[in-house]
Image: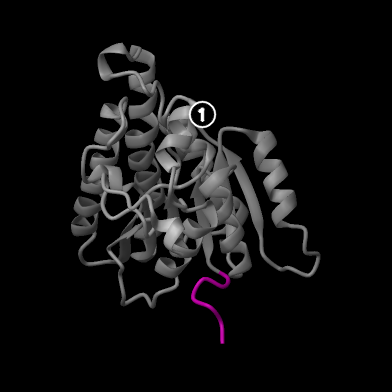
């Protein structure tokens, strides 16, 4: 029996490292075709070679370089993906970044603020707009999975999060609104909200401050990128009449955004 993703065409942003790379690996293992999107062509080439290592696999793997904060770049990449794979069945918006932490908002540069807004807000909207108009609305079917964050629901417990927190709250609002606007189609719009994940991205969020990073994760085991990929696959592989509209995936020790059971590892 075929898996729901087998033979589907998936477009993935932020594909070249961390959570994106883990999701890409799971998508290919599920038998779906994929087009990888990221800024770095070198990293995309390396990931494509890694994913295409099985000579017996019939999965198609393509890639496009893109600046998700630039609409012309996004539209070109989406059209390139369609040329490589065919119509897009699944869009996974995963590109994101956090800059300037742990500096407070007033100490960020204008460039840092605009770069985060362009990537985290415009990037999601531009990709969704292009994929809807170039592919999904033609057949009125598809799935859009927005990787957001539980930090969009409450103010995070560490400094330097004003812009990133606002960006993630906007992503959640956009996800909910666009889902309503697509009433009358078979297009699902889903939100995956990770909690604490041990990736370079989280290190970046605390300004690559090793002491702050180690202190934050002290006493509990954070998630890793394959945990997020497994959750994304679970959401995507539900029958089309089932929408897991939003799903929070956090370490068991993360009782809420700000409350951590730091004795969790000792009791296991």
Q: Within 10 angstroms of label 1, few (less than 14), some, or many (20 or more) residues?
A: few
The answer to if 182 sits in the magenta stretch is: no
Who's the residue at 71% across and 42% down the image?
45
Q: Is residue 1 above or below residue 75?
A: below
- Establish if 241 lies above or below 147: below
Give the camera-side residue of 222 and 267: 267
Check the image and tell me how it is coloured: one colour
| Residue 34, picture quadrant | bottom right
Mark 1, residue position? 210
Q: Farthest residue toward the bottom?
A: 1
Q: Where is residue 218 shown, x and y percent of the image?
A: 44, 43
- Magenta stretch: dominant secondary structure: loop
Residue 171 seen: no
Q: How many marks?
A: 1
Is residue 238 at least partly visible in the picture? yes
Q: Residue at horizontal 45%, vertical 41%?
A: 95
Classify mark 1: helix, strand or loop: helix
Task: Residue at 20% x, 63% y: name it.
Answer: 183
Q: Is residue 136 left or right of residue 201?
A: left
In x, y percent, where is residue 210? 51, 29
Question: In this rendering, would 66 be left or right of 91?
Answer: right
Work out which quarter of the rendered image holds the N terminus and state it. Answer: bottom right
For the point 31% across and 59% down, which residue is it? Answer: 189
- Is residue 196 or residue 243 the one in the foreground? 196
Vertical position of residue 144 compared to residue 7: above or below: above
Residue at the right extreme, as displayed: 55
Residue 170: x percent and y percent? 24, 40
The magenta segment = 1-7
């Amino acid at each position: 029996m075929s898996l729901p993703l087998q033979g589907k065409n998936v477009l993935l942003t932020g594909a070249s490292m961390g959570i994106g790379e883990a999701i890409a690996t799971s998508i290919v293992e599920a038998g779906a075709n994929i087009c990888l999107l990221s800024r770095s062509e070198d990293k995309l080439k390396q990931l494509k070679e890694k994913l295409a290592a099985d000579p017996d696999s019939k999965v198609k793997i393509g890639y496009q370089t893109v600046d998700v904060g630039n609409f012309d770049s996004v539209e070109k990449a989406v059209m390139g993906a369609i040329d490589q794979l065919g119509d897009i069945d699944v869009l996974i918006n995963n590109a994101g970044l956090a800059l300037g932490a742990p500096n407070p908002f007033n100490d960020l540069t204008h460039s840092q603020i605009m770069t985060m807004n362009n990537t985290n807000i415009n990037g999601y909207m531009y990709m969704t707009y292009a994929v809807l108009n170039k592919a999904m609305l033609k057949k009125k079917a598809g799935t859009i999975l927005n990787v957001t964050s539980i930090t969009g629901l409450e103010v995070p417990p560490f400094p330097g999060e004003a812009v990133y927190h606002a960006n993630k709250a906007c992503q959640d609002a956009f996800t909910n609104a666009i889902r309503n606007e697509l009433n009358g189609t078979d297009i699902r719009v889903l939100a995956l909200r990770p909690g604490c994940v041990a990736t370079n991205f989280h290190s970046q969020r605390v300004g690559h401050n090793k002491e702050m990073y180690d202190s934050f994760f002290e006493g509990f085991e954070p998630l890793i990128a394959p945990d997020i990929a497994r959750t994304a696959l679970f959401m995507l592989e539900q029958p089309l009449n089932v929408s897991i509209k939003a799903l929070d995936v956090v370490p068991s020790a993360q009782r809420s955004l700000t409350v951590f059971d730091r004795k969790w590892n000792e009791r296991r």
